[in-house]
Image (spheres, rainbow, N blue to C red):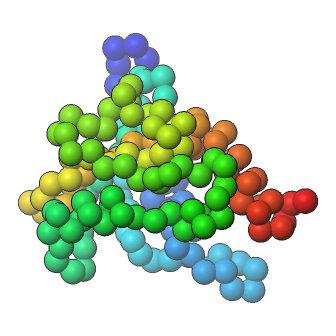
């Protein structure tokens, strides 16, 4: 892996395109009814860093928005879990960086104990509306911390005593 970038990670692209639709899904009669939007097309490339998942995101919006509005929306985004005061839920959930060279895995992956999501490089896209870069800690936010946060949520909602 050192000094190498691998352009294929088996199963990651499919998972990255399909898994988020569960977030927007409806549950009917105990089954997921997957959402059709947003549509996601992913390329996953392995870059050897110790921790951190970075995404280059291109976005097409139905309504026109300007950069100031989008940055303000990111900065003011309220995590729906905030009202539950879960110990592992980061505050703020999203952090927007104005600098063109951020977020960076080494500098920003541990944001808010590794549970924060950082976004930067928001700029107009010549094909779609906008593009940006986002970063999360793949172990703390993605695996271990995500599991702890889910357990805290289940306890708070009374599913676990």
Question: Which of the image's four quarters has the N terminus?
Answer: top left
Q: Give the camera-side residue of 46 and 85.
A: 85
Residue that protrudes farthest toward the right in the picture: 161
Q: Give the camera-side residue of 152 and 140.
A: 152
The vertical placement of 11 against 29, above or below, is above
The vertical placement of 47 against 45, above or below, is above
Question: Which of the image's four quarters has the C terminus?
Answer: bottom right
The vertical placement of 23 against 41, above or below, is below
Q: Is residue 119 left or right of residue 37?
A: left
What is the quadrant of residue 39 in the picture?
bottom left
Q: Residue at x 14, y 69 (%)?
A: 66
Q: Position of residue 59 (x, y in %)?
A: 26, 63
Q: Residue at x 77, y 63 (%)?
A: 156
What is the quadrant of residue 143 in the picture?
top right
Q: Is residue 153 left or right of residue 18?
A: right
The vertical placement of 54 against 13, above or below, is above
């Amino acid at each position: 892996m050192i000094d190498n970038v691998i352009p294929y990670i088996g199963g990651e692209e499919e998972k990255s395109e399909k898994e988020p639709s569960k977030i927007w899904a409806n549950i009917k009669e105990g089954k997921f009814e997957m959402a059709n939007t947003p549509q996601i097309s992913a390329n996953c490339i392995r870059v050897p860093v110790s921790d951190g998942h970075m995404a280059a995101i291109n976005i097409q919006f139905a309504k026109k928005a300007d950069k100031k509005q989008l940055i303000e929306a990111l900065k003011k985004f309220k995590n729906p879990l905030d009202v539950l005061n879960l110990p592992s839920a980061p505050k703020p959930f999203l952090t927007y960086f104005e600098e063109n060279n951020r977020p960076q895995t080494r500098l920003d992956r541990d944001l808010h104990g590794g549970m924060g999501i950082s976004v930067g490089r928001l700029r107009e896209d010549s094909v779609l509306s906008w593009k940006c870069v986002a970063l999360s800690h793949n172990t703390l936010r993605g695996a271990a911390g995500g599991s702890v946060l889910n357990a805290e949520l289940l306890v708070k909602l009374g599913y676990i005593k």
